Amino acid sequence: MDSADDPRDGSDADAAGASELQAIAVALRRMNSEVNRLIHAFAHAQGLHATDVHALGAILDAEAPLTPGRLREHLGLTSGAVTACLDRLERSGHIRRARESSDRRVVHLYYEPGAKAAARSFFMPLAQAAAGACAVSPPEELEAALRFIGRMNGELIRMQVPRR
């Protein structure tokens, strides 16, 4: 019997696992492409760069006010690139910088409420699409999807990528 035909060698299981991994990779790339399409459209509508929109997302999602240094680390940009990004965002009314501590060197970044409302309005179709997908998914499926996405994000955060 040829080893390729031997069910004990796990080749069928390996092939099934590889096929499933391929399907997940394709689905993630497709979703990423669609979200990036929306990000670019929003950036264009606001006269911003796509990187600026990623910065806005980081500022919005941060558990505590971001500093320019933490934003630089998150985006993997140089200090100069982050400064240019923040200058554009501040000029366009999307963020404000605030010095709130006794150490005047510490700057915190805040998403301006009016700009946040504009983004919420622009991305409402994305929220509606997510709500539609959630509406037809059983709770246990949503919980499993959230666990997977959380683990995937954890893995991506741990990946070492070359700095720009």
Image (spheres, grey):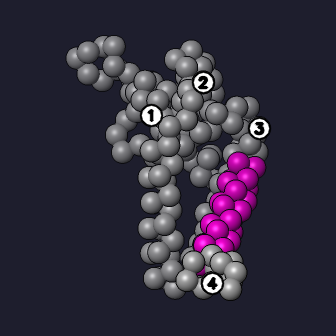
Of marks 3 and 4, the one in the foreground = 4
Q: Specify few, some or many for label 4: CA neighbours under 10 Å numbering under 14, 14-19, or 20 or more.
A: few
Residue to which mark 3 is pinned: 44
**Which element is circle 4 on?**
loop
Q: Is residue 79 above or below residue 63?
A: above
The amino acid beneath tag 1 is Tyr
Is residue 78 toward the left or the right of residue 110 in the image? right
Q: Is residue 82 above or below residue 53?
A: above
Of marks 2 and 1, the one in the foreground = 2
Residue to which mark 1 is pinned: 110
The residue shown at (64%, 33%) is 51
Of marks 4 and 1, the one in the foreground = 4
Is residue 45 toward the left or the right of residue 151 in the image? right
Q: How far apart are the two marked residues, 4 and 2, measured between alpha carbons?
A: 48 Å
Q: Earlier in the sequence, mark 3 or mark 4?
A: 4
The amino acid beneath tag 2 is Arg
Q: Specify few, some or many for label 1: CA neighbours under 10 Å numbering under 14, 14-19, or 20 or more.
A: some
Q: Nearer the viewer, residue 114 or 31?
A: 31
Residue 79 image position (x, y, % from top left): 52, 17
Q: Earlier in the sequence, mark 3 or mark 1?
A: 3
**Which element is circle 1 on?**
strand
Please identify the quadrant where the C terminus is shown: top right
The amino acid beneath tag 3 is His
Residue to which mark 2 is pinned: 164
Q: Nearer the viewer, residue 45 or 70?
A: 70
**Which element is circle 2 on?**
loop
Q: Is residue 31 above or below residue 91?
A: below
Identify the magenta region.
13-38
Q: Reply yes or no: does residue 37 show up in magenta.
A: yes
Q: Reply yes or no: does residue 42 show up in magenta.
A: no
